[in-house]
Amino acid sequence: MSTTLTPKAPETTLPQTPADAEGVRLYGMYIDGEFTATDGRDMIDTVDPVSGEVWARITRGTAEDVDRAANAAHRAFTEGEWPKLNPSQRGALLRRIGDLVSENADWLAYIEQRDNGKLIAELSMQMRYMANYYYYYGGLADKIEGSVIPTDKPGVLNYTKYEPLGVVACITPWNSPLPLASMKIAPALAAGNTVVLKPSEFTSASLVELMKIMERAGVPKGVVNVITGLGAEVGDALVSHRHVERIAFTGGPIAGQMINEKAAKHMKRVTLELGGKSPNIIFEDADMDNALKGAIAGIFAASGQTCVAGSRLLVQESIHDAFVERLLEMVKQAKFGHPADPDSQIAPISTRPQFEKVKSYVEVALAGGAKLALGGKPANVEGCPNGLFFEPTVFVDVDNSMRIAQEEVFGPILSIIRFKDEDDAVRIANDIEFGLAAGIWTQSIGRAINMSNRVRAGTIWINNYRSTSVTSPFGGFKMSGIGRECGIAGMKEYMEVKSVWISTETNIPNPFVRR
């Protein structure tokens, strides 16, 4: 038995999830406005990455379950209460969801922390901010306008309008289940679509908890559904389902490519956010204190388990040695502890497979010729003997052609690469198949603008790292994905543009000639 202390659950007014005789929570799915029973169903263990113990079990869904959910979502889109709501009414509903998310932020953070082991200090902030997705898109719901087109055709009035697509499949990963799901659910609903959500089999509990909020807010039955289970068993069925019009996916490139191929066969639209290997570029004129903090935040926040991790640290050669020395000293001071402790700074790796992958990349780096400067092994954390903790790891003498510099690790492993000048930094930064984000640290406004124009990435941070907002579009170039989330651009991903032509003539001319 583990001696790890279990964090105390905060109070909540949401209905309690049933548990077995040992106190393990049992999560069903949410289909057509009802939580499904778990009796007699195959279940998947959910392991707490801090204690190593099973704390919950989720239903192992089937293709038949997907069919029921997709049919319910299609039915809700075409008939019943949902299509009768006007955009302002949809917006009001979304704002109610936001209120309930705010009221239950501590509870949602607790569930998410049990699920994926993130720091409670970060999760508490994320859960409170998550309400803004519903507030923002609730406010935007009745503000998407079409246009009257000044065409070159006489005798007709032409205008455009935006309409919902239909059923949207939202597939989310294990690193930030609730925020990434809300990033998709909120604009999809604001636009008038219905949703079938498939979370990672490692972190499904928090998404099922969110359905209790949807129900309490008054979301009509069938409008939002959650299917749990394995990707090969329910994910594939969801992507291929005839009623699904769009797939919004966040995850790895290989899974993203497979989804894109399946979707293309049926002309389904996709939004794919597929990770990256982002460069964090430190110039010799940067504010060193801030650049050090930005370098550390870029890779070791969330233990590197973030799509925008600044895992390639490019340091100008004139300051390289001094900067690396200071960086190593700062990283050595990082505090390990139970992620439920607000003072802890390093969280565990969220899943056992990912933990093993992170370990394997240490060998990949060493075999490729990189030099280990710090870390490189699992960490023993007091009070968490079975926790999946890994030391912050730094490699130096890294060449950008090495595997450790080219492949996404999704863990606390930093590769430091020297560069000579701006041209060299741009060459290295862009010599990668990804293009999600980049950081640039300089006090020269001209250099900042020049570099932001030349680096191929969807998000560029100047003298900061990991800043995001629901108001600003987010997405990547190249293998980092297709489409954008957040902002007005994010909502339009869930809509069709329709062009309407109205004749104003009383007598149509020669019908055999195209006008």
Image: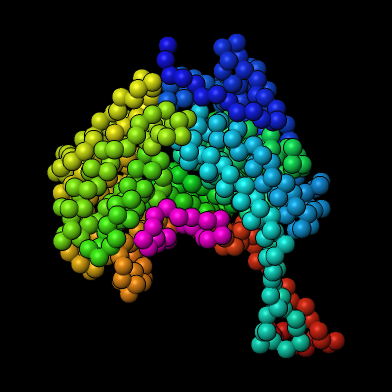
Magenta segment range?
Answer: 456-475
Left or right, residue 36 beside residue 259: right
The vertical placement of 507 against 167, above or below, is below
384 or 47, which is in the foreground? 384
Residue beneath the point at 31% across and 32% down:
390
The vertical placement of 131 against 290, above or below, is above
Give the percent coordinates (x, y) of residue 238.
Answer: 58, 41
Q: Quadrant of residue 198?
A: top right
Residue 458 located within the stretch drawn in magenta: yes
Residue 392 located within the stretch drawn in magenta: no
Left or right, residue 195 beside residue 435: right
Which of the image's four quarters has the N terminus?
Answer: top left
Residue beneath the point at 68% across and 80% down:
149
Q: Is residue 484 visible?
A: no
290 or 481, which is in the foreground? 290
Magenta stretch, main secondary structure, is loop
Give the percent coordinates (x, y) of residue 514.
Answer: 68, 83
Give the percent coordinates (x, y) of residue 79.
Answer: 80, 48
Residue beneath the point at 47% across and 24% down:
47
Residue beneath the point at 21% across and 53% down:
323
Q: Quadrant of residue 452?
A: bottom left
Which of the image's four quarters has the C terminus?
Answer: bottom right
